[in-house]
Amino acid sequence: MKEKTAMPLNEIENKRAYAKYYTGQMAKPNPEQMAKLLKGPMDAGLAIYPQEAAKLLEPGYMEGETGYCIMENGAGYLAVNNKFPGVTLDMIKWWFAWHPLEQARYRIWNPYCHQSVAVSDQDREKILNPDIPVENKIADVVHFVMEDIGGGMEDVVIHFRPTEELGFSKEALAAQHAYIIGGYGLTENRARPTGKTPAIMMHYYRETEDGIESRTRFWLGYRIIKGQPVCVLPEGAKVPEFVPMGLALHNVEEFSHLASFLPQLYRELGESKPIQ
């Protein structure tokens, strides 16, 4: 397998105030989460379906909090419990609103795998509007992404959706000191043009004693249609097992790295400042 190399910043990007966070290196991925994933697939009976996502509101942890598998209907599933010491919910909201405005911001998140990100002019105007609350700069925004999660460069379109459409009320989330960021997307691999793969994504963030944690869930082969999650795989089709495995490992790597620099980045560029 060809070894990945960091994607460098250009001359203009190197002059950005945040360029110092691009070192071409990644923080060490959470060893506990990596060890769980490298053991192999989890019992599919421990997976939850997207219609059951509200179970994340329950206190404590699920037995299958970190793992991946192929579900009975052929869909790919993954769950990851990443830790963010020193990070707050406000920081993570700001990050998801701030980073898609410039490619270099996306690249500091994962210099080896993230190539580019873009939003429409309309979404950019919304994100930059100081009168719109930060959380409203995330939902109903579409990210156009190029990244490599282990199988070659992919074109990804991510539709971030309101919390209610994901099965959570804002009141219930607030009561649990939690916040959810998610939606659905389409992925197309440039090296293996086999069509677009749909997925539903949820990052459930909640406060912990020393920061926050994310309880990530992906359902590969699902879309949100008329506000409801639907498995759209052809009858008898199955997502290859290596796909959720690779995405789960990628998730641990990039969120471990984000946790390493987000508190300082937010204090410098985000706290009490309009998004620019």
Image: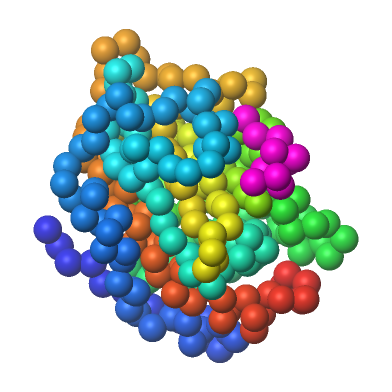
Query: For the view shown, which residue lies furthest in the top direction?
Result: 235
- As for residue 107 lying within the magenta part, the answer is no
Residue 8 locus on image (x, y percent): 38, 78
Residue 17 sits in quarter: bottom right
Q: Quadrant of the C terminus?
A: bottom right
Q: Nearer the viewer, residue 116 or 106?
A: 106
Q: Nearer the viewer, residue 200 or 46?
A: 46
Placement of 189 over or under 50, stated as above or below:
below
Left-right relation of 107 to 54: left
Residue 269 sits in quarter: bottom right
Which residue occupies 33% across, 29% down? Answer: 46
Span shown in magenta: 167-176
Q: Nearer the viewer, residue 262 or 139?
A: 262
Q: Main secondary structure of the magenta part?
A: helix
Left-right relation of 30 to 108: left
- As for residue 169 lying within the magenta part, the answer is yes
Placement of 228 over or under 87, stated as above or below:
above
Which residue occupies 80% across, 57% down? Answer: 133
